[in-house]
Image: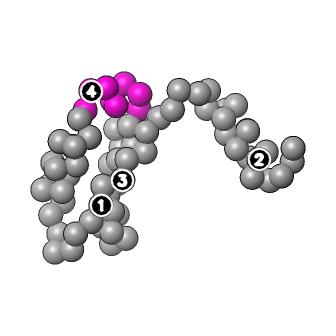
Amino acid sequence: MEINNKQEKGYIEVWLTNEEQELYDRSELTDMLISHFSAPQRCRVVFFLSGQGELYRCAEDLLVKNLGCV
């Protein structure tokens, strides 16, 4: 798990692997982070979740599509 405090931009990033997605309840994790990083302004907790695909193949497909190289 990786947590990045980006409250100056209005959010907290949380990166979870597939295994961590099964271990942690995101609602409880959100409540814990909001209480831990209490600030005068409200912020959102944004989750980035690992997928099931193979990383390099998915990245290659995304680059090809975005660059219009099909």
Q: Which residue is mark 3?
A: 46
Task: Work out which quarter of the rendered image holds the N terminus and state it.
Answer: top left
Verify whether residue 70 appears in magenta: no
Q: Which residue is mark 4?
A: 23
View extreme (right): residue: 70
Q: Position of residue 62 (x, y in %)?
A: 70, 44
Q: Residues within 10 Å of mark 1 (few under 14, many from 20)?
A: some
Q: Tag 3: residue type?
A: Val
**Which region shows up in magenta?**
17-24
Q: Residue at x 67, y 39 (%)?
A: 59
Real-space CA distance between mark 4 and mark 2, rounded to the nearest whole angstrom: 34 Å
Q: Position of residue 46 (x, y in %)?
A: 36, 53
Residue 44 - label: 1
Element assignment for label 2: helix
Q: Tag 4: residue type?
A: Leu
Element assignment for label 4: helix
**Residues at circles 2 and 1 in contact by the CB criterion of under 8 Å:** no
Element assignment for label 3: strand
Task: Work out which quarter of the rendered image holds the C terminus and state it.
Answer: top right
Q: Which residue is mark 2?
A: 65
Real-space CA distance between mark 2 and mark 3, rounded to the nearest whole angstrom: 25 Å
Q: Tag 1: residue type?
A: Arg
Location of residue 26 with respect to 31 vertically, above or below: above
Real-space CA distance between mark 3 and mark 4, rounded to the nearest whole angstrom: 17 Å
56 horizontally vs 18: left or right = right
Which sits earlier in the primary sequence, circle 1 or circle 4? 4
View extreme (bottom): residue: 40
Q: Residues within 10 Å of mark 2 (few under 14, many from 20)?
A: few
Name which quarter of the figure residue 23 lies in: top left
Q: Tag 2: residue type?
A: Lys
Verify whether residue 21 appears in magenta: yes
63 horizontally vs 20: left or right = right
